[in-house]
Image (cartoon, rainbow, N blue to C red):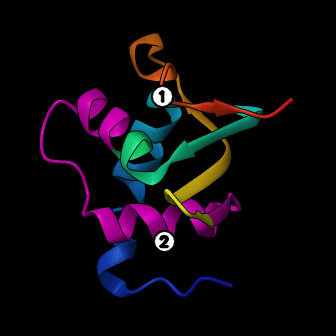
Amino acid sequence: MVRLTEADRKHVAKFAAVVGEALEECPNADASTMLLFSACAAASGDDFIPMGTFNRLLMATGYKRTNRRYGARFVGLRPVNPDYQGRVYYHD
């Protein structure tokens, strides 16, 4: 269970609006937190939410976070923008 702070709750509306446009579910995708954040920041067009808040809100939404040797990643999400998809690992 993820505990959201009051500061996190202030960003929920912006998170929901941007993530719905910038990210899509893909069951076999494994994408870095930074890649997902960058895709959302590019889609928002202005200052996006803080990275820690973004991470906690994704986990609160139910996405699984994994800690791999090459960094923190989320399973089941990838950017909608094909320019970013080349940096997503896909499981067989």
Mark closer to the chain start, 2 or 1: 2
Residue at the extreme right: 92
Q: Which residue is mark 2?
A: 56
Q: Main secondary structure of the magenta part?
A: helix
Q: Is residue 56 magenta?
A: yes
Indicate the quadrant where residue 8 lies: bottom left
For disc 2, the neighbor class at 10 Å (few under 14, some 14 to 19, many from 20) is: some
Question: In percent of the image, x 65 and y 64: which residue is there?
Answer: 66
The answer to whether 62 is drawn above or below residue 16 in the figure is below
* Above or below for 56 versus 36: below
Q: Amino acid at mark 1?
A: Arg
Q: Residue at x 39, y 13 (%)?
A: 83
**Mark 1, other Cα within 10 Å: few <14 / some 14–19 / many ≥20:** some
Q: Secondary structure at mark 1?
A: loop
Task: Name the residue furthest top.
Answer: 82
What is the secondary structure assignment of the residue under circle 2? helix
Q: Position of residue 14 (x, y in %)?
A: 34, 49
Residue 87 image label: 1
Residue 90: quadrant of the picture: top right
Circle 2: residue type: Arg
Q: State the extent of the magenta-drawn residues as a range.
A: 38-66
